[in-house]
Amino acid sequence: MAKKKKLPLAYQPFGFVLGWSSGWLAGLAFRKTWMAIRHEEDAPDALDRDRGWGEVLLAAAVQGAIFAVVRSAVDRAGATAIERSTGTWPAGDKGGRD
């Protein structure tokens, strides 16, 4: 079985754009989700004195979950696109695809 070439340098600019895009998309999704959950435009942050622990931790948990899911989906879609266009999985051998 032939060893696949790594693409780290070629993938880095693409990965940067994907990371930025996923952050923007996740932020938008979180704002819409928070509006649906609490009917408020601004979610609390840890230093918001007028918000309770439960509300701050709920906002952090929802935000973290959304960011993780969106980032993983965008990264996976980007890696799949790179593999389709170049024949090489961006993570090289550690990608686990053959």
Image (spheres, rainbow, N blue to C red):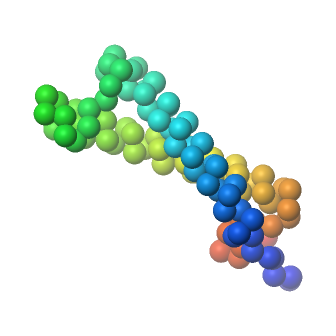
Regarding residue 73, the answer to whether it shows in the image is no
Residue positioned most to the top: 39
The N terminus sits in image quarter: bottom right
* Above or below: residue 75 compared with residue 6: above
Please state the horizontal and vertical placement of residue 42, each as a whole percent of the image.
Answer: 32, 25
Please state the horizontal and vertical placement of residue 82, each as a whole percent of the image.
Answer: 78, 57
Regarding residue 45, the answer to whether it shows in the image is yes
Please state the horizontal and vertical placement of residue 54, each as a whole percent of the image.
Answer: 19, 36
Residue that appears at 40% across and 20% down: 36
Please state the horizontal and vertical placement of residue 53, each as a whole percent of the image.
Answer: 16, 38
Residue that appears at 44% across and 32% down: 30
Q: Could you say which is closer to the camera, residue 14 or residue 89?
A: 14
Q: Is residue 88 left or right of residue 72?
A: right
Numbered circles on residues, count: 0
Q: Is residue 41 left or right of residue 96?
A: left
> For residue 80, which quarter of the picture?
bottom right
Q: Could you say which is closer to the camera, residue 61 or residue 19?
A: 19
> For residue 40, which quarter of the picture?
top left
* Above or below: residue 88 compared with residue 43: below
Residue that appears at 60% across and 42% down: 21
Q: Could you say which is closer to the camera, residue 79 or residue 14?
A: 14
Residue that appears at 81% across and 76% down: 4
The C terminus sits in image quarter: bottom right
> For residue 46, which quarter of the picture?
top left
Q: Is residue 78 left or right of residue 32?
A: right
